[in-house]
Image (cartoon, rainbow, N blue to C red):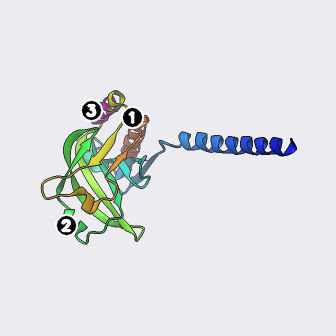
Amino acid sequence: MKRLLLIILSHLLLFFIVFAYQAQAHAEDEEWTIDSLETMAYARVSGEVIHGDNLNFFIDSRDDCQKVWNNFTFVTYNDPGDIKQLIGKHIPITINGEEITAKVEHISPFLKLGWRVLFTIGTYPVKEYINVLNNFYIEEKKYEIKIIDGIDFKVDKYFDISVNSWKLDNLVPSVLAAHKLCKQLNDMES
């Protein structure tokens, strides 16, 4: 009987440890980074599928903090030997199933085992774009980017995981904080 009670208590303790860990992990699901780099302030959130994939919103003080450059990264461990030839190319993607293209801006080594590919979606007026994107996220209840096959482009050749999603519940306050930081950078330059 004591043995059974000890087993039950052990399982309960394990359950509470796992439950506490899950609660903490859930609270950190959407951790945004707000920072600056030279003349730009940015808001960044990590991916849900691959944490190393980032969705970024850069705001440049040289544009008087009026535009946001939206880009994202995908990490891949595929090494086809010609991955750098993708730089400058428009690669087909879907955002929540809607087909568009994203331009490959930069490719750099990642942890000596793979590559980090930086894609750009474009540059837009800050407040209008963030409001549209926020409404899109609220309506769709997700923000998922998938790299897809296109003319003379096979996703499996370059990317081992071709889909990621990001939580954007805190999009507006995060980008507004980056916008405020950009204004401070702008004031320092004046």
Q: Which residue in the protein does label 3 denote?
A: 128
| Marks 3 and 1, the one that precedes in the sequence | 3
* Disc sitting over residue 172 in the figure: 1
Q: Is residue 169 left or right of residue 18?
A: left
The residue at 64%/40% (across/down) is 19
Q: How far is disc 2 from disc 1 in space, using C-alphas?
A: 35 Å
Q: Which residue in the protein does label 2 denote?
A: 85
- Asked if the stretch drawn in magenta spans residue 63, the answer is no
| Marks 2 and 1, the one that precedes in the sequence | 2
Counting from the top left corner in percent of width and height, residue 149 is at: 20, 52
Bounds of the magenta segment? 127-136
The single residue placed furthest to the left in the displayed view is: 151
- The amino acid at mark 3 is Glu
Q: Nearer the viewer, residue 102 or 147?
A: 147
Task: Name which quarter of the figure residue 37 lies in.
Answer: bottom left
The residue at 36%/64% (across/down) is 77
